[in-house]
Image: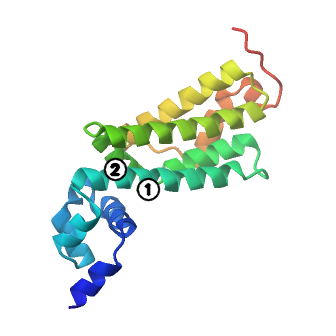
């Protein structure tokens, strides 16, 4: 009887959050229907009430991850008290957290076999690109250069997501130095033209 009351209270979001927590604590291979049912103390019927199959769960997980990233990016974008360069470092630091890397890696791996998840990953990448591009434009970098630098930084971040286990993790100070080194005049607000 307790199980049926518990099942009726679970929402699709509860399942998605439990799956994201499993990824963060036990890895991608832990995301199985039986494992989630055990963790949530419910039957498989509850899962199938919300999701057609495991792919549908992954699609919902990717969308929830996009919403979570979107709200964090919006908060970061609103930090007008931070200079644009500081926002870039905060963004990079946020995206390099252990939890973020674990979940992001799993979602990107699943995106290789699921087009809906792949679409969500592309949306996430576009949202990150826009925050980086807008921050660079605030530094009065010309649009062409800002677009190229934003692309370079986002590509580097995607590469780090896939290769971070074998690479040293930069500190916020190292990130600041690296980002500053990529900016014209060491990150000063001197305008850079689009020529070249």
Viewed as shown, does residue 86 lie left or right of 34? right
The residue lying at 39 percent from left, 48 percent from top is 104
Viewed as shown, does residue 9 lie left or right of 151? left
Q: How many marks?
A: 2
Can you give x and y, in whole percent of width and height, for residue 86 in the image? Answer: 70, 45
Q: Is residue 159 above or below residue 99?
A: above
Classify mark 2: helix, strand or loop: helix
Q: Quadrant of the C terminus?
A: top right
Q: Choose top left, top right, bottom left or bottom right for residue 121.
A: top left
Can you give x and y, in whole percent of width and height, for residue 194 in the image? Answer: 73, 14
Residue behind mark 1:
64
Mark 1 Cα within 10 Å, few/some/many (few <14, many 20+)?
some
| Residue 125 visible, this orientation | yes
Residue behind mark 2:
59
Q: Is residue 103 above or below residue 155?
A: below
Task: Pick whichever of labels 1 and 2 is earlier in the sequence.
Answer: 2
Q: Quadrant of the N terminus?
A: bottom left
The residue lying at 73 percent from left, 41 percent from top is 84
Mark 1 and mark 2: Cα distance apart in space: 9 Å
The residue lying at 36 percent from left, 54 percent from top is 60
| Residue 167 visible, this orientation | no
Viewed as shown, does residue 54 lie left or right of 158? left
């Amino acid at each position: 009887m307790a199980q049926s009351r518990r099942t009726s209270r679970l929402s699709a979001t509860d399942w998605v959050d439990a799956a994201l927590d499993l990824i963060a604590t036990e890895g991608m291979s832990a995301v199985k229907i039986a494992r989630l049912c055990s963790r949530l103390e419910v039957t498989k019927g509850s899962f199938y009430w919300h999701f057609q199959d495991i792919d549908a769960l992954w699609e919902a997980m990717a969308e929830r991850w996009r919403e979570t990233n979107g709200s964090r990016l919006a908060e970061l974008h609103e930090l007008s008290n931070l200079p644009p360069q500081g926002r870039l470092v905060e963004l990079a630091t946020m995206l390099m957290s252990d939890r973020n890397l674990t979940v992001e890696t799993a979602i990107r791996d699943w995106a290789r076999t699921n087009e809906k998840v792949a679409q969500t990953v592309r949306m996430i990448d576009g949202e990150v690109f826009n925050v980086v591009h807008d921050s660079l434009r605030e530094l009065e970098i010309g649009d062409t250069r800002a677009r190229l630098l934003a692309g370079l930084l986002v590509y580097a971040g995607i590469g780090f997501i896939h290769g971070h286990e074998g690479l040293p993790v930069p500190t916020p100070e190292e990130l600041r130095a690296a980002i500053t080194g990529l900016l014209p005049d060491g990150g000063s607000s001197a305008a850079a033209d689009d020529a070249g």
